Amino acid sequence: MTDITLLDGAIGQELVHRAGGGATNLWSTQVMMDRPELVGTLHADYFSAGATVASTNTYALHRNRLARAGVEDKQAALINLAVERAVAARDAHGSGRIAGALGPLLATYRPDLMPDVGLATQRFAEIITLMGGGIDVILAEAVCSLQEAEGIFQGVLESGTDKPLWIAFSVDDEDGTKLRSGEPLGVIAAMVAHYRPAAVLLNCSTPEAIDQGLPVLSDCEIPFGAYANGFTKITDAFRKDAPTVDSLSARQDLTPAVYADHVMAWVGAGATIVGGCCEVGPAHIAEIACRLRAAGHTII
C-alpha cells in the first residue's frame, strides 16, 4: 500500500501529566529540569507503541520564555539535554528518526502577536544551530500565521542547516480552512512553492478542523500530513500573557479508537505523515500503528 511516517504524540503535555504537581509557565521545560529521566522514558514508550519519529522536548525552549523564570542562560544546556534524551531512546530502540521541535517564538495560539521576522529569523537559527547534528529533521509546529512561517523559513536558511524542514500549521478550530490568524489556509501554497520544505502538515488543532483543512494541503504538491490535539477548546485564559496549561482541558471522547478513525481518514486522503499532538498519548499511537498495519501500509 503506502509508506507512512508515524510521529509520536504529545511530548509537553504528557510530561506534565506524568510529573504530576502544579503547572508552571515553563511547562514541560520545568519537568525536564526536575526529572529529566521522564523525557527518555516517554520517547521510549512512543517507540514501543510504533512511532518512528521522536520529537525533542524543545518546543518551548525560546529565550523569552526562559527569561521569565530567570533561566535564559540554560537554553543551550536544555536543548542539548532534550536532543540527547531523544537520541538515547532512539538508539536503545534500534531505529527511528529525531525531529527537532520548534514552537512559536512568542506564544502558542497567539497569531495577534506577529513576531518581527528579523528577530524570529535570528532566534530560530540559533535554536537550530544548538540542536546540532543530533536531529534528522526540523519540525516547526503550531504555526498560526504567514508572518510566523516567514520567520521560520528565514531562520532555517540563516542557520545553514542541511536538515529537511517539516512545517506544521495550526488551523482555526471552527473553520479548518483558515489559519488561526484568519488567513485562508490556501495561501500557504505559494510560500511552500517558494521555500520548498520537505513536508507540510496541520497540527495542534481539533481533528475535526484538520478534517476540513487537510484537502487544501494536497495543492502544495509535496508530502503532507497531520497530527491533532485533544483539547476541548483553546480558552481565552490561555491566550493571556504567560498562561499555564491549567487553562485547558482534555476531551473525554477522543479515545484511541476514535482518534485513529480520523487519522486513517487522513491517510485515505493522501497524508503520509501522521501522529498526535497535545493530549494524544502512547495508547493512541499504538492504535494508529495497529490500524496502519492492518490496512497494509508500511510504517517507516
Image: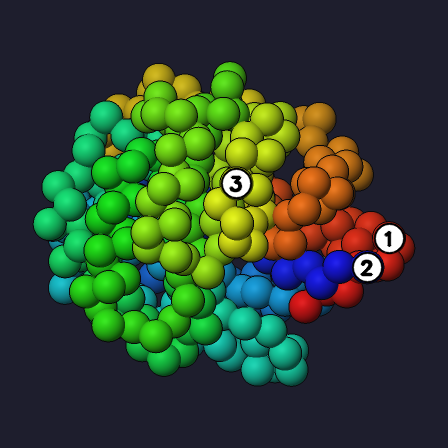
Q: Which residue is mark 3?
A: 219
Residue at the location (57% across, 42% down)? 218
Q: Is residue 236 above or below residue 158?
A: above
Q: Is residue 125 above or below residue 67?
A: below
Q: Is residue 32 left or right of residue 53?
A: left
Question: Disc 2 vs disc 1: which is toward the camera?
Answer: 2
Residue at the location (41% across, 67% down)? 164
The answer to whether any part of residue 109 appears in the image is yes
Q: Which residue is mark 1?
A: 295
Residue 1: mark in rendering: 2
Residue at the location (63% across, 66% down)? 52
What kind of element bears circle 1?
loop
Residue type, mark 3 in image: Asp
For the residues labelled 2 and 1, say whether their Cβ atoms are less than 8 Å apart: yes
What kind of element bears circle 3?
helix
Displayed quadrant of residue 145: top left
Residue 266 image point, x, y percent: 68, 41
Query: Is 69 or 298 nearer to us in this picture?
Result: 298
Q: Is residue 21 left or right of residue 41?
A: left
For the residues labelled 1 and 3, say whether their Cβ atoms are less than 8 Å apart: no
Dividing the image into 4 quarters, which one contains the N terminus? bottom right
Residue type, mark 2 in image: Met
Displayed quadrant of residue 240: top left
Which mark is first along the chain, 1 or 2?
Answer: 2
What kind of element bears circle 2?
loop
Displayed quadrant of residue 232: top right
